[in-house]
Image: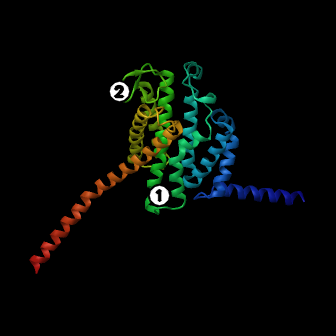
Amino acid sequence: MMVTHAGSAQSALSEAIKLIRSSPPTWQSALLNNVFIFVLGLPILVSGLSLSGIGAAFLLGTLTWRAFGPPGFLLVATYFIIGTAVTKVRMAQKEAQGVAEKRKGRRGPASVIGSSAAGCFCAFLSIFGVGGEASSQVLKLGFVASFCTKLSDTVSSEIGKAYGKTTYLVTTLKVVPRGTEGAVSVEGTIAGFLASFLLAFGSCVMGELGAAEAIICLIASQIANVGESIIGAALQEKEGFQWLNNDVVNIINISMGSIIAVLMQQMGTDFALAPSEQSQATQKKERLAVSRISG
């Protein structure tokens, strides 16, 4: 009897391991892996998210694993760990100055959605094969670019609030208090750039992107963050734009990062193809000329 139970347990474990290692990922493997990782990482999750925020993050993690496998999940996990860590930096100082995130930096579901909407959109399109095989790498690029953009934004904001000696309003370059919407600092900007670099080239190392695509993500994230700062300075908290809260601005920001990256990649592809097409046209003319002479 005990032998039978032991055999059943071993068989169930073997099936579970096989499911976890499924390649390409399935919904079942994504769910099982996500449960396992979330149980192990619960202390870290609790430090950075509210209970409802953890629920939203679980859905995001499952979707990401299903769409882009372990590398995509690791990318999002890296974003979360770094973002949570910098949010906690000099928390007492930030609270005293009134610029700290609410709930000691523990973000809720609206923040999770606002930070991942563009990435989730790319993941959904990838899962359902929209655009076919030709679009799969483009969607992966958009996904990575969205999180590079958001991590850069989070790090630049939190490090700027903690260490920024002087903060400037991006639209006028006037000196303003830390935490002002649309304000930037040298310290925060450098930190945000380095964070985006880390995530972009981490994706390159994991084989998600090529080196050129990683550079595109890095550039796109910085352009998008400048755009986000301009929106914050010009519109956020202004009359008639009360709906433009941080979560909405986050969605706009990461969407800009994704779209800019995809457009840059497309422009690069078109530029690379142009000489080839010109060469083919020249060869066609030469063959036509030769045929006329022969005739």
Q: Which of 217 and 171 is in front in this view?
A: 171
Question: In the drawing, what numbered circle is on residue 172?
Answer: 2
Q: Quadrant of residue 79?
A: top right
| Residue at x 45% of width, y 37% of height | 196
Q: Assign a secondary structure to mark 2.
A: loop
- Where residue 225 appears, x then y in whole percent? 42, 37
Q: How crowded is mark 2: few (under 14 residues within 10 Å), some or many (20 or more)?
A: few
Q: Nearer the viewer, residue 253 or 242?
A: 242
Q: Quadrant of residue 84?
A: top right
User: What amino acid is labelled 1 in the image?
Assistant: Ser
Q: Assign a secondary structure to mark 1.
A: helix
Mark-to-mark CA distance, 2 and 1: 41 Å
- Where residue 43 appears, x then y in whole percent? 68, 35
Q: Which residue extends farthest front?
A: 240
Q: Which residue extends farthest left?
A: 293
User: What amino acid is labelled 2 in the image?
Assistant: Thr
Question: In the drawing, what numbered circle is on residue 136?
Answer: 1
* Left or right of residue 161: residue 230: left
Closer to the chain start, of discs 2 and 1, is: 1
> Colour scheme of this structure image?
rainbow
Vertical side of 43 occupied by 214: above or below: below
Number of numbered tags placed on the structure image: 2
Q: In which quarter of the image is the C terminus?
A: bottom left
Q: Which residue extends farthest bottom?
A: 295
